[in-house]
Amino acid sequence: MSRLPFSIVAEVVLLGALLAAGNATADPPPVPVPDCAFVPSHADPDGRARRAFVSRVTRAFAASHAASTGAASAGLTGVVSHVRRVLVNYVDEEIFGAMDAAKVAAAPPSPDAEFLRRASLDLTGRIPDAATVTAFLADPSSDKRSRMVDTLLASNAFVDRWTFYYDEMFQNTAFASSGRIFPAGRNAWHAYFQDAVRSRKPWDTMAKELIAATGDTMSAGAADFLARGIQTNGPGQDTLDNLAASTGAIFLGEGAVFCTSCHNGGGHLDSINLWGSTVRRQDFWGISAFYSRLTLNRTPTGQPNVYSYAVSDRANGNYLLNTTTGNKTDRTSAYYTTIPAGLASINPAYLKTPANPSGGAPANGETFRPALARLVTSDPQFARAAVNYLWRELFKLGIVEPADSFDLYRQDPATPPPGSWTIQPTHPNLLARLAQDYAAHGYDLRYILGVMAKSSAYQLSSSYDGAWDEAYTPYFARHFARRMSAEETFDAITKATNVPASIPVSSGSNVAWAMQLPDVQEPGARSVIGNFLNAFLRGDRDGDSRSNEFSISQALLLLNDTTVTSRIKSGTSGSSVNKLITANAASAQIVTSLYLATLSRNPSAAELAEGVALFTSTPGESKAQVAEDLQYALLNKIDFFYNY
Amino acid sequence: MKILLPTLPPPGSTPFNGPELSRRGFLELSAGGLVASWFLGSPAAAWAASSAQVTPRGSARNAIFIFLPGAPSQVDTWDLKEGSWTPPDFQPASFGGGLRFPAGLLPNIAEHLPKVAILRSVRASALVHGLSQTWLQIARNPTGATGSEAPSLGSIAALELDPQRGPSDVLPSFLSLNTQAGLSGAGYFPSTFSPFVVQPTATGLPSLTHPDGAARFQTRWNDLAGLDAALRTGQPLGKDASDAAAFYNQAKVLMDSPEVNGLFAYSASDSARYGNSSFGNSCLVAKQVLAGGRGARFVMVSVGGWDMHSGIYDKAAGTNLYTQAGQLDPALSNLLADLEAAPGKTPGKTLLDETLVVVAGEFGRTVGALNGQNGRDHFAINSALFAGGGVKGGQVIGATDASGGAITDSGVAGRTELRAEDIACTIYSALGIDWTIERHDDPLGRGFEYVPNAKDGVYAPIDRLFG
């Protein structure tokens, strides 16, 4: 099998495709034993949709990969056509280098309007306003895209959107099915993230503050990271294990370690995660043990059944192997013959990995949680996981997928994994360079997002010239369109129509943008806005994942909900339609203005003609009514509610 | 009734070997004409699965799950324990089989007890509202391995019943009315099987009616069709985006079916019979929608407010047992009466015969005298109600001790207590769904059991309910 400069996510998929193609000589991998285990949903809020997507992509990719190894190369034989691109930075070297090597043609560069809308949504969560679009399109300078990225990175909306990113990543919610931090704790945590983004707090500093946080959860927001791990229906070890799993998934992209909270990786992860299959349960407990001196003292607030937690550390203690109850299999030395008989407790021990072979432990006298924070942030995997999560935000698909399931034995092309295993990242060098760059620039969120957003790779069009093949997906050969998130959709409606919202937040002030909400439980499901956001599948930051799928309920809301229909009215003072009608704008101007405000682009000549014709071809309707209808139709266009 | 399952993958194969395993592949299956039916093929057959090959009962065509989040006090209602604390106006009375029931608190339900089977041996697995509410909806530990990918009971039912849909079935199969916080969704299934969330109003389904009138809507729809034709007929943004057009077409079919909207509208007199509450109206709509037979098969109706840590009998408190029972009593009793009065799809059967009604909260409340705040706190032992869909009414299954503090008899041989998972098995079996199915299309690739461990017999349908 020839070596290609990338890999696929799960080689069992490749093997499956080979078998399906009649090449049945390969040994099948061991069958994973799907018995009970606990897998985190932290840090992968859209995990299920993404995993399904990845599964589909990798199967298609594997099929063409298999075909290309045969006599007739059937898959990646596309001719590189009209490549119009500039290698802006190392992102482009890696992305286009891989495409060139495999003779995969890139999509054309995005038009200015497509780029502006995409970058605005990805970096600030909002569509650009009409004036910004017009000025940007008219700007003849060659560096205007990079300058626009800088403008977006410096905006207040950027703070909202990336505060939301952290709220999602850490599953900040007042009432989770188990841990409850209450609206005041949630608001404090939200405020912590907001301050961190606004003040350009480095990601490693954030990680240290969160892991080692002390104080009251309703005032010291970082402390809510600890309280969010509380498991109320089990022994204390459940909470420690939750925190160990969150630490692995959020900070290190090592979701596989959570599997080992119930059983050794061997026998379970053998065909899924090579590294994970070597992690033992006591290795997992070594991480849990870093949290074993954590105390969460429930503090009454004066309100009935509402508590904050005072977070601090005891001077002694470690992780006790003394329970057969709770949400995990027994935590006793007797559960595994590999554990020394009679062992009563586990001391903190950081996981040994290929990139961090010495593991680590608290120094003499070092408090456990700060020791863990030190070890996590000095682990090379810390930066790799972070840039992969961020890449996924902008490119819609990670370099490693699923992004919370790194296989640490399959990262370095210089030491390839054995047998049929392949390197996990689609672009291992790119991942390494991004991680290095992020760390070298002080884990500055704006800096690393700027590197990504300024690349030509990010600015490829989502429309592909010629026939698209799923096998091109791992090359990022086009930009991937996705339905806007619930919050983005709602905010785009208020912004396009220029009819703002005032959204109530319990125990807090009203906000104007859904992206500013601290919690997906705000406002409640019974309110018009809460119902709208829920129908757009914002999830609950707990058991119910966020999804970008479309649905019949969403179509009905866009067609008939007052969220849309009340905002298109010419009688609504200040609305986009109202301003145009009040100014007695000509029909062509109305069409153009509404396209700019709603779709962030000018109408094509055909669209302009079609739009203008509506004003004469709609019997019995006034100019204002036709303008309302047009605004309505634009809000229901697929290129409105898609980020493309 | 036997569910046909595809051949199992050969030994040594992985969950990824199946021919059509991703749900995206599943969506691709359905890419052909979508007008009134969501999908052409049978998704259950297209996805590899294994099963213990049990024979589901198949005694119910529909299910109504009446969900009481907050957790009602079982010892004041379904498992009445009389004591010095019992308010006189509960008027405990004896019914057939020695059943004691608070006829003063739930007077109308008392008259329908011959239709109802009470299960008194349910034990909740957690005493945290959110955790336990989700547990009941997905029949597993939400913090467990498959908790974050698990579809709710209604979504699984919707997927399993999908092959039975016909051209006139324009409503989504899974409906949620009077929805409370914490509704579980489609999990890893396509959003087609998400709950269709409706808050009933007297004039019908708000989202099916264009606020500016049908004529105006038609103009706007035509404008949209013209302006968006390129994106709706081709795939320049990829398949996901073009799938959105199909959902729009389905929405339009619903809007163009006034008789469907009529199923969601109700009269003032009917609303009064059901108690003039949003929960009552939702029960009324549930009955109408099932009677209408336009595709909805699993209806969840919720009413909260049961978390009475203080002032449980205090009529001056904003929410107390009288206010909540006052909503439940007329709504549930009229629902049962109306379902019984309506003809079923099969000649000679009533709609109640064809509809399993289940009433349950996420756990119970403490027993004996009230707590220091005159309320009752969280307690694992709980009761549930069953009616219709083949259930033999007028019986009590399982028993607790004199205080209600312990289960003395689960009512099922070999079991000391019953769980939310058993209730799920019961619902699936009644609907003709093999409750032991383990799908191999889940994104985690570890196998997704409809009810964990049911294929090993750990949980099972409660057959005694059916006589």
Image: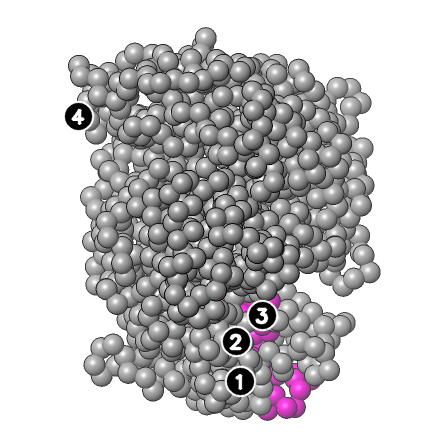
Q: Nearer the viewer, mark 4 or mark 1?
A: 1
Q: Amino acid at mark 1?
A: Gly
Residue indicated by mark 2: B279
Residue indicated by mark 1: B275
* Host chain of mark 1: B
Q: Nearer the viewer, mark 3 or mark 1?
A: 1
* Host chain of mark 4: A
Asked whether residue A524 is in view, the answer is no
Q: Are marks 2 and 1 in contact (CB under 8 Å)?
A: yes
> How is the rendered protein coloured?
one colour
Q: Residue at x 77, y 27 (%)?
A: A367
Asked whether residue A633 is in view, the answer is yes
Q: Is residue A278 magenta?
A: no
Residue A496, position as x, y percentages in the image:
56, 49
Q: Amino acid at mark 2?
A: Phe
Marks 4 and 3, Cα distance to the nearest angstrom? 57 Å
Q: Are marks 3 and 1 in contact (CB under 8 Å)?
A: no
Nearer-the-camera pick, B205 or A331: B205
Q: Is residue B66 magenta?
A: yes
Q: Magenta segment range? A: B64-91
Q: Please tell me in which quadrant of the rendered image residue A339 appears.
A: top right
Q: Amino acid at mark 4?
A: Gly
Residue indicated by mark 4: A22
Residue A495, position as x, y percentages in the image:
59, 49
Q: Are marks 4 and 3 in contact (CB under 8 Å)?
A: no
Label 4 in the same subunit as label 3? no
Question: Considering the numbered disc 2 on the image, is that residue within a helix, a strand or a loop?
Answer: helix
Q: Around disc 1, counting alpha carbons within 10 Å, would you say few (fewer than 14), some (14 to 19), or many (20 or more)?
A: many
Q: Are marks 2 and 4 in contact (CB under 8 Å)?
A: no
Label 2 in the same subunit as label 1? yes
Q: Please tell me in which quadrant of the rendered image residue A478 appears.
A: top left
Residue indicated by mark 3: B304
